[in-house]
Amino acid sequence: MSDKRTVRFGLLGAGLIAPFHAKSIAAIDGCQLVAIADSNRKRADDRAKEFGCKSCSSLDELLADKSIDVIGVLLPNHLHAEPTIAAAKAGKHVLVEKPPAMSLADTDRMIAACNQANVKLGIVLNCRVRKPIQAMREAIASGRFGRILQADAFMKWYRSSEYYHSDDWRSQRRSGAGVTIQHAFHYIDLLQYLMGPAKRVRAQMCNLAHQDVELEDTLNAWLEFENGAHGLVEASTAFWPGTDIRIELNGENGTAIMIGERMDTWKFRDQRPEDEQIRQFGRKSVTTAASGPADFDFADHQKVIEGMVEAVRHGGEPIITAPSARHTLEIALAMYQSARTNHPVSLPLADESAAWD
Ligand SMILES: NC(=O)c1ccc[n+]([C@@H]2O[C@H](COP(=O)([O-])OP(=O)(O)OC[C@H]3O[C@@H](n4cnc5c(N)ncnc54)[C@H](O)[C@@H]3O)[C@@H](O)[C@H]2O)c1
């Protein structure tokens, strides 16, 4: 396979997130969008027209197209597993939107199917690629924070009642529409991406502002990480007009805070020349989905898709692997279990079905 081989994508799902993928693919050299499929044919047709590709209504049609290398699974959260497994069996690489699936068992089946078929499986957890997060991760790895004491994620967002009624799955807890697995998932992921595994979780969930849907719009959770640090997650879609997320790290030798995509605070006992440049990260960015589901830029998606293209072309792993996202799902499931039982939950999860009982 030549290094410059064009990598061709087929997208399954023509909804809200599809343009982020289509625009990213168009922006990457040697990358092409071949087709968009959606069971709502009009939606597929409209997107295909917008992005200059074929339109179809099912995964089977994408799988039958021999020119397609990668299937993007952009379906509602509870529908990720079977298309991923079918795509792998058809010899296609797969890039799946977060969360990987609604259960660890399904995630494991997806990983096994892709391993068995020797195809790549990438997960879209686009916030990981933000420059402030990469800087935090490097500073942790090089020991700059010293012992980390606290790692928090605050997501005070707003989603309207219309948002929750825009499609059936958006108002159903078991489809993955609650704030924990749908919105906060990115920021729970950032905490475990930075801190490593969690060992204990305690959570409370409630519905503060969307009483016409039966799911949690608000999460308050406490985490204990294996590295000894503690963490808080406050996440809600009830707080109008919605403000930028905050990721806060406090170590014995330093503090870093990202707000939205911007490095707000970057202070260490050992100051270094590169710190001033790091403090400028994200200064130009504006919207980060705090007030509306599509109010953000596709640059982070583009980086994730570039990583997938590299993995397909040259071998190696996608930049966000399914095993690396699995623990985020485990933490989210533990939060559901803890909120339901009103008890702390230890990880690894002994019985994941207890999350949804
Ligand atoms: N990474 C991010 O920042 C981000 C942001 C938003 C959404 N997402 C994720 O993207 C995924 C899709 O979310 P969305 O907001 O685009 O949802 P959406 O409801 O807007 O779109 C989903 C589409 O899938 C179609 N569909 C459903 N079942 C189908 C099937 N069996 N075959 C073909 N098409 C089918 C629907 O008709 C719909 O057009 C979810 O997993 C969500 O969590 C990620």
Image (cartoon, rainbow, N blue to C red):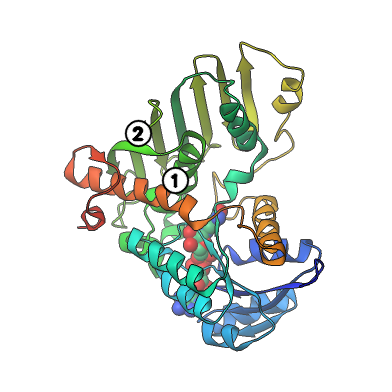
Q: Is residue 242 above or below residue 97?
A: above
Q: Residue at x 64, y 82 (%)?
A: 45
Residue 310: image x %, image y %?
Answer: 71, 60
For marks 1 and 2, the one nearer the N-term is 1
Judge whether residue 225 can be spotted in this image.
Answer: yes
Q: Which residue is mark 2?
A: 223
Label 2 element class: strand
Instruction: Work out which residue is located at the far top of the displayed protein and give it.
Output: 269
Residue under label 1, please give it. 184
| Figure check: 25 above or below 212 | below
SS of the residue under disc 1: loop
322 or 158, nearer to the observer: 322
Res 17 quadrant in image = bottom right
Q: Residue at x 25, y 40 (%)?
A: 346
Give the left or right position of residue 123, taking residue 337 as reference: right
Q: Quadrant of the N terminus?
A: bottom right
Q: Nearer the viewer, residue 304 or 76?
A: 304
What's the residue type where badge 1 is placed? Ala
- Between 286 and 277, the one lying in front of the other is 277
Amino acid found under the numbered disc labelled 2: Leu
Residues packed near mark 1 inside 10 Å, few (<14), some (14 to 19) or many (20 plus): many
Mark 1 vs 2: CB contact within 8 A? no
